Amino acid sequence: MKFPEPRGPITSTLFRALACTPGSDEGSAAVDELRLLAARHLTASADIIGDDDVQLALFCLYELHYSGLEGINDEWEWEPGLIQVRRLIERPFEAALRAAAASASASAAESVTLPPAGELTSDAVADILFGLAASDTGPSVSRFVAKKATLDQVKEFLIHKSIYQLKEADPHTWAIPRLTGRPKAALVEIQADEYGGGRPERMHSALFARTMRGLGMEDRYGAYVDAVPAVSLAAVNMMSLFGLNRRLRGAITGHLAIYEMTSSQPNRLYGNGFRRHGFDADVTHYFDEHVEADAVHEQIAGRDLAGGLVEAEPGLLTDVLFGAAAAMAIDGRLSAHLLASWENGMTSLRAAVPAAA
Ligand SMILES: [Fe+2]
Ligand SMILES: [Fe+2]
């Protein structure tokens, strides 16, 4: 990924550090400065999920574990000072996600009933998650895209989605070696589909790139990072947080389960929105594929992955529900931002979009 534009003192200091050689005097001094800056800023930040400087810094720190940042020394990935900064940000970020998830599940409490501890079967866990998914009756971006979105708004929608969808499935893959038995087999089964079942052109990330090209947009990973607000980055950072911390393996399975459970119907509507603008199956393939695939994935993710994990480790139920509710809460916040912007005739992006490919 290309270096994004810094969004404040944390990201500009981080980028200055990354331009150095790890372990060099200059690099170490920049990391020390970064650690102090981040610690001071985090105690003062009232809304970490909406904090541009913090979310972009975390996004780039995680990116070191994915495909990296253009031109930097790969040794930075495990440089202890940067890991320290990442953990410094992760702690209050996780706390903010737990608070957001708690209010999301409090409003869903009526539709979700927890069985007695002894009856925590994988089917019961799946039912709880389906109940949680069904409780989401908030304003819907998919309905707006299907019926009303202009071509520019449809492109904005793709820009927000591109931050994750061009590396679709990668954050959940971190969980594979952290699971065993039934949940592991279930996750691999889902991921095999996400990665195209052995055919690179069928990888979901590749199908999404095709959609973007079909609209004359840039399909290179991270091309639009500068354009999206903090909450769009937070949605991806949440997955990396859950995937990269073994103790949060319950949360990453709950996250994937709720994603799959809330995907099939919205993707049908997204596809309709693109068809309404005259785009053909080449552009809508990504959405059409998810209508079919996720009707299957939601069953595997609910019963065998999340349900199988809780059956084996009942203590993880709380975190499974946390991951699911946090996904809904952040998604809800992003949806509210998109719809409020569009209904007021404004852009939902933070910066001018770079010229299309
Ligand atoms: Fe997918
Ligand atoms: Fe899926």
Image (cartoon, rainbow, N blue to C red):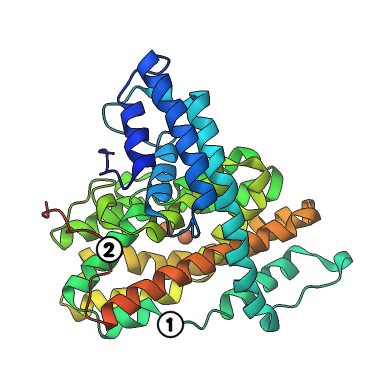
Q: x, y (%) of residue 201? A: 29, 48
Task: Work out which residue is located at the far top of the displayed protein and give it.
Answer: 24
- Label 2 – label 1 distance at C-alpha: 18 Å
Occupied quadrant, residue 255 = bottom right
Left/right placement of residue 174 relative to residue 338 reads right
Q: x, y (%) of residue 327? A: 53, 63
The secondary structure type at the circle numbered 1 is loop
Q: x, y (%) of residue 213? A: 17, 56
Q: Is residue 129 above or below residue 161?
A: below
Label placed on residue 139? 1
Left/right placement of residue 142 relative to residue 263 reads left
- The residue at which mark 2 appears reads as 158
Mark 2 CB within 8 Å of ligand 1: no
Instruction: Look at label 1 and name its amino acid.
Output: Pro
> From the image, which quarter does the N terminus lie in?
top left
Q: Residue at 64% of width from left, 56% of height from top?
A: 305
Looking at the image, in which quadrant does ligand 1 appear?
Answer: bottom left
Q: Earlier in the sequence, mark 2 or mark 1?
A: 1
Q: Residue at 43% of width from left, 27% of height from top?
A: 31
Look at the image and tell me whether residue 215 can be seen: yes
Query: CB of mark 2 within 8 Å of CB of mark 1?
Result: no
Occupied quadrant, residue 104 = bottom right
Q: Nearer the viewer, residue 85 or 35?
A: 35
Tell me if mark 1 has few (under 14), some (14-19) or many (20+) residues whose alpha carbon lies within 10 angstroms of its own.
few
Instruction: Look at label 2 and name its amino acid.
Output: Leu
Q: Nearer the viewer, residue 218 or 160?
A: 160
Tell me if mark 2 has few (under 14), some (14-19) or many (20+) residues whose alpha carbon lies within 10 angstroms of its own.
some
Q: Residue at 70% of width from left, 78% of height from top?
A: 112
Q: Residue at 78% of width from left, 51% of height from top?
A: 313
Look at the image and tell me whether residue 263 can be seen: no
Q: Is residue 166 above or below residue 133?
A: above
Closer to the observer: label 2 or label 1?
1
